[in-house]
């Protein structure tokens, strides 16, 4: 078996001869073959076209040999192939008629030497403080998603961060093509399998996940979440498998949650959207977002914490650390700094209790490391006050540059309304009735009581009050423009509410006044009718009365 494997490796090496020098070059991270003529390499984060090339038959034979090496088929019926080379490099192949440029091959290489956290710090991928926070999060069994675009270093980052998992724990990994190179001792590795030529024998990521849950894992690591297995992963994270990790394609933390939500829906799960979002936020605690910048450098752009949904059912997040780009030099190199935002994680009170005494308030203060508060970051409103407190001694110019908004709460709006109400002495309901009817000289106490008790339809009053409130506010001449021009006065929310309340009170009094006058008029009409009837009964005359001048005329 080993001899046959060596034969395959030697044969494959022969077909890779045109690009062998780039495969052996540790500085080359990716090789891209676009047909047999065009070959590109990525070196130092930048793409370069090389002079090497294949023959048309040679590149086709290479694709077939790669498929044989991994025990799969590639043909017109199966024109796509995911595989790996003997050295662990990931390879993807697409052949005609899908690929119009000819056979397309991409080889993603990995570092032969073991990468460590210190090496990533030396590369500038993140800072020691960011590494320390991730270490604490992993040790406290916080479920973590590593997100980023293609080539941003998600898998490399996952390999490195897995070193923080305690050695005593059992880890089960699942991948479409084996890429993870965990240094831990107790690791069980699974790989999916494509169906054979008869369409049978497929083993999906979901199948592997179901098996892993029955194998007593302490941690579950998915190489990449791509489909409906996302819901099973969330269920596992929500049911006692804390500290699990996975990667997903997304550009930033908030898109990461939306991406997971979409993957759950792809699995055909028939749940309300809010229930799915609750599953996502309940399962994921930390998101580490990696990015590849225009100069080819790869960095951790965000370390964010996922919070429960808000009242509207929307995602809520807060950035703990963030990379801020400051400028690009003449050579195209990106410059910036990574710093905490001044926002404390929701589990801050548990850090000292868990023995992490170095994780106090100063650890999350950017001033501790000589940086200002980053100008843009996500955070809940009651956390941004901490960030503002850190910069309260800054100069005025710094305050203009740094801006963290603190939205006004609804309670403060209510206080403003209450304050406006208290600005003038409040009249009792009886005094308002007296004022309303004193204009017409209605002073009768009984009639006023009737007006107070008179029931007016609330819907009618509310409708008319809104119409009155929508009327234009009296214009005020602006002292800065010509006297002939008028400008509308812009009301605050508190003033609008106060105006609406006044309109309602005025209309209620108006309706009661109308009802009282109508009642009074009806009573007077009844009295007149009664008096006229009595007169008719008492003053009935005969047509033969001598005093009737009409009869004499007749």
Image (cartoon, rainbow, N blue to C red):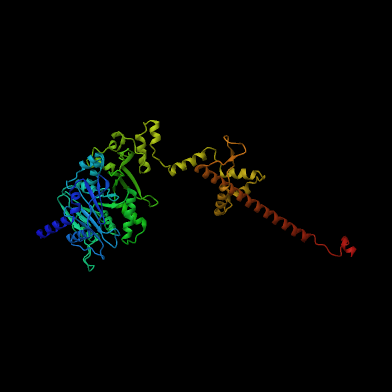
Q: Quadrant of the N terminus?
A: bottom left
Q: Quadrant of residue 379?
A: top left
In the displayed structure, would residue 280 be above or below residue 76?
above
The front one of 296 and 552 is: 296
Residue 476 in the image: x percent, y percent? 59, 39
Residue 174 in the image: x percent, y percent? 21, 56
Q: Quadrant of residue 545?
A: bottom right
Residue at x 38%, y 51% (from the top left corner): 314
In the displayed structure, would residue 82 be above or below residue 133?
below
Q: Can residue 243 be seen in this snapshot?
A: no
Horizontal side of 427 relative to 330 (left or right) equals: right
The front one of 44 and 444 is: 44
Label tally: 0
In the displayed structure, would residue 278 be above or below residue 433?
below
Q: Quadrant of the C terminus?
A: bottom right
Horizontal side of 462 relative to 551 (left or right) equals: left
Residue at x 59%, y 44% (from the top left corner): 432
Horizontal side of 492 relative to 113 (left or right) equals: right
Residue at x 52%, y 44% (from the top left corner): 496
Q: Can residue 226 be seen in this snapshot?
A: yes
Residue 344 in the image: x percent, y percent? 31, 41
Residue 165 in the image: x percent, y percent? 19, 47
The front one of 542 and 455 is: 455
């Amino acid at each position: 078996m080993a001899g046959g494997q060596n034969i395959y490796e030697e044969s494959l090496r022969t077909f890779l001869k045109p690009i062998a020098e780039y495969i052996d070059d540790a500085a080359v991270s990716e090789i891209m073959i676009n047909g047999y003529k065009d070959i590109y390499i990525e070196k130092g984060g930048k793409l370069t076209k090389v002079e090497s090339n294949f023959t048309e038959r040679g590149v086709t034979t290479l694709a077939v040999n790669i498929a044989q090496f991994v025990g799969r088929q590639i043909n017109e019926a199966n024109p796509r192939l995911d595989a790996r080379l003997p050295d662990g490099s990931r390879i993807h192949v697409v052949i005609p008629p899908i690929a119009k440029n000819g056979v397309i091959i991409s080889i993603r290489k990995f570092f032969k030497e073991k990468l460590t956290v210190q090496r990533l710090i030396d590369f500038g991928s993140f800072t020691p403080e960011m590494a320390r926070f991730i270490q604490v999060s992993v040790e406290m069994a916080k479920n973590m998603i590593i997100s980023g675009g293609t080539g941003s270093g998600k898998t490399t980052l996952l390999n490195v961060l897995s070193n923080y998992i305690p050695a005593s724990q059992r880890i089960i990994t699942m991948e479409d093509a084996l890429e993870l190179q965990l240094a831990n001792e107790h690791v069980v590795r699974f790989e999916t399998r494509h169906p054979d030529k008869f369409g049978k024998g497929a083993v999906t990521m979901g199948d592997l996940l179901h098996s892993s849950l029955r194998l007593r894992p302490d941690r579950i690591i998915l190489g990449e979440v791509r489909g409906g297995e996302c819901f099973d992963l969330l269920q596992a994270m929500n049911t006692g498998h804390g500290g699990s990790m996975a990667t997903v394609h997304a550009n930033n933390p908030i898109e990461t949650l939306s991406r997971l939500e979409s993957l759950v829906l792809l699995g055909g799960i028939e749940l309300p959207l809010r229930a799915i979002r609750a599953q996502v936020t309940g399962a994921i605690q930390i998101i580490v977002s990696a990015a590849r910048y225009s100069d080819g450098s790869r960095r951790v752009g965000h370390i964010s914490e996922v919070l429960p949904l808000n009242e509207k059912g929307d995602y809520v997040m807060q950035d703990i650390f963030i990379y801020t780009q400051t400028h690009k030099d003449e050579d195209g190199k990106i410059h910036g700094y990574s710093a905490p935002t001044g926002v404390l994680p929701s589990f801050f009170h548990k850090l000292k209790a868990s023995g992490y005494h170095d994780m106090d308030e100063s650890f999350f203060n950017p001033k501790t490391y000589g940086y200002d508060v980053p100008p843009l970051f996500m955070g809940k409103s009651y956390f941004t006050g901490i960030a503002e407190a850190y910069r309260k001694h800054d100069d005025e110019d710094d305050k203009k540059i740094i801006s963290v908004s603190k939205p006004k709460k609804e309670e403060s709006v209510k206080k403003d309304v209450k304050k406006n109400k208290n600005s003038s002495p409040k009249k009792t309901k009886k005094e308002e009735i007296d004022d309303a009817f004193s204009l017409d000289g209605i002073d009768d106490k009984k009639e006023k009581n009737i007006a107070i008790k008179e029931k007016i339809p609330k819907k009618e009053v509310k409708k008319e009050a809104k119409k009155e409130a929508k009327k234009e506010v009296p214009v005020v001449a602006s002292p800065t423009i010509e006297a002939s021009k008028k400008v509308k006065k812009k009301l605050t929310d508190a003033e609008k509410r106060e105006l609406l309340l006044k309109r309602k009170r005025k209309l209620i009094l108006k309706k009661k006044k109308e009802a009282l006058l109508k009642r009074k008029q009806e009573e007077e009409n009844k009295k007149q009718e009664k008096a006229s009837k009595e007169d008719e009964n008492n003053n009935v005359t005969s047509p033969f009365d001598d005093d009737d001048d009409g009869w004499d005329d007749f």
